[in-house]
Amino acid sequence: MDGFVRVPVREQEAKVRATNFKEVCLGYNKEEAEKEAARCLNCPNPKCVAGCPVSIDIPGFIQQVKEGNVEAAYQVISKSSALPAVCGRVCPQESQCEGKCVRGIKGDPVSIGKLERYVADSARELGIKPEGAKEKKGKKVAVIGSGPSGLTCAGDLAKMGYDVTIFEALHEAGGVLVYGIPEFRLPKDDVVKKEIENVKALGVKLETDVVIGKSVTIDELMEKEGFEAVFIGSGAGLPRFMNIPGEQAMGVFSANEYLTRSNLMKAFDENSTTPIMKAKKCVVVGGGNVAMDAARTALRLGAEVHVVYRRGEEELPARKEEVHHAKEEGIIFDLLTNPVEIHEDENGWVKSITCIRMELGEPDESGRRSPVEIPGSEFEIECDAVIMSLGTSPNPLISSTTKGLEVNRRKCIVAEEANGQTSKPGVFAGGDAVTGAATVILAMGAGRAAAKGIDEYLSNK
């Protein structure tokens, strides 16, 4: 039965990791990786590749792992992915490549994500870099945003020979990889910064503290600074709220603010110049991956944490692995529950939140059953902090300062799915700025598609 069961991956024990910000998953060593790689059947028609948004040659790189050739495995992956160490950690493989693996029909699918992580981490330790362009095209392309879509687009364009400059609004590159995803899931110094260095090694230039729409506009980049094409990968950083009574109380955070302050500004450190509130009892509203990140961060800062979500466990949008880890660490899930009011104390700080019980009715437009309130089922949870994790929207600054750039009713930029082309000639877009908040790998897929679109556009110009 060995071939039907995946090689288990080592992790920090739940009680230990709940008190620190060190990475939870410890990954495979060489022996474990080669044993797991041996489970791959090397299918002639690999469905795993079709399930990957950036179309990595998965059987190809796994074959190299089987043979103990890490450098060759890394070069196979890096043809399609600029961020393999990131993807190996945060991709929802269970619904993508691993979800299509034929091994999963009668047993466990091959642990593709953990193998990708092993290859990327091993290559980093050995100093192996991705291969760059042999010839330069002499054409300038601007990339707005250094998150997963921007880094991917920039990396692909640099490999094609374009002169690429990334403009990042924050003081540090990485976008959601540095401000949104916690250290215990994605280490910043050892993983994210090293992946960005690999993109820069391809010849990509990076300028931080440049707010497009204020520091400079897209029109100015194209008309005055000689950029022949622009890719917008600015993400979706504008948080949503419920608009319930008491939401303006002190101690109410958006998940975006809470995670940014903890991850990027290191506000959990007592010596920080902007220390974050260390709650005693915290309620996190929402059920996605960002909600799990916020809840697990609050737990590590010393709080008793309740996740309040209006649907049941089967409908939780977060990855099963993240929910499993959260439960192991002691986070309490109040499901089929929805907040209706936040209460303040005499000083204006959160003291409790009133919730109402829900039941699932008929399916909504997304196919999920709609939650319906149960009259008279209200109850109160005492707490001193509430974190709203209800999704995010794109900031309208770029679209409002760019002539001829079409947006939809959700303020998302309208772009062709196949190549990222927007309504403005030479301007392409992808990732959360187009779709609203989604996953890292989908943003990367959009960045790859846009790079191909930009190449075709400039080749025919």
Image (cartoon, rainbow, N blue to C red):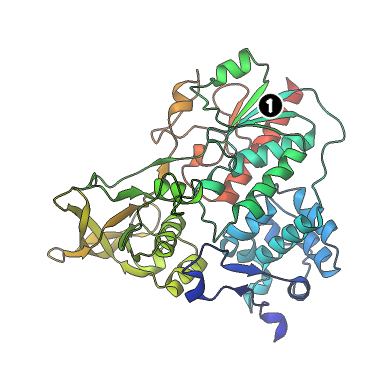
Q: Rate crowding at label 1 as few (under 14), some (14 to 19) or many (20 or more) other CA atoms within 10 Å.
A: many
- Residue 431 at what x, y percent from top left? 55, 41
SS at badge 1: strand
**Which quadrant holds residue 291?**
bottom left
Q: Residue at x 20, y 53 (%)?
A: 342
Residue extending farthest bottom: 1
Q: Residue at x 20, y 57 (%)?
A: 351
Residue 235 seen in the current view: yes
- Would residue 309 be seen by someone viewing this image from the given angle? no
Q: Position of residue 327 (x, y in %)?
A: 42, 72
Q: Could you tell whether 334 is left or right of 381 in the image?
A: right
Q: Which one is nearer the viewer's eye here, 11 or 245?
A: 11
The image quarter containing residue 9 is: bottom right
Tally the numbered discs.
1
- The kind of residue on which mark 1 rests is Val
Quadrant where the image shows the N terminus = bottom right
In the rendered image, the quadrant that contains the C terminus is top right
Residue tagged by mark 1? 141
Question: Is residue 370 or residue 395 the one in the foreground?
Answer: 395
Residue 287: percent from left, percent from top: 39, 59
User: Residue 62 at x, y = what percent?
Assistant: 78, 64
The correct choice, above or below, for 57 with respect to 243 in the image is below
Location of residue 86 (image quadrant): bottom right
Say which residue appears at 29% left-offset and 56% top-offset.
Answer: 385
Q: Is residue 210 above or below residue 262?
A: above
Horizontally, residue 189 falls left or right of residue 134, namely: left
Query: Does 289 appear above or below 417?
Result: below
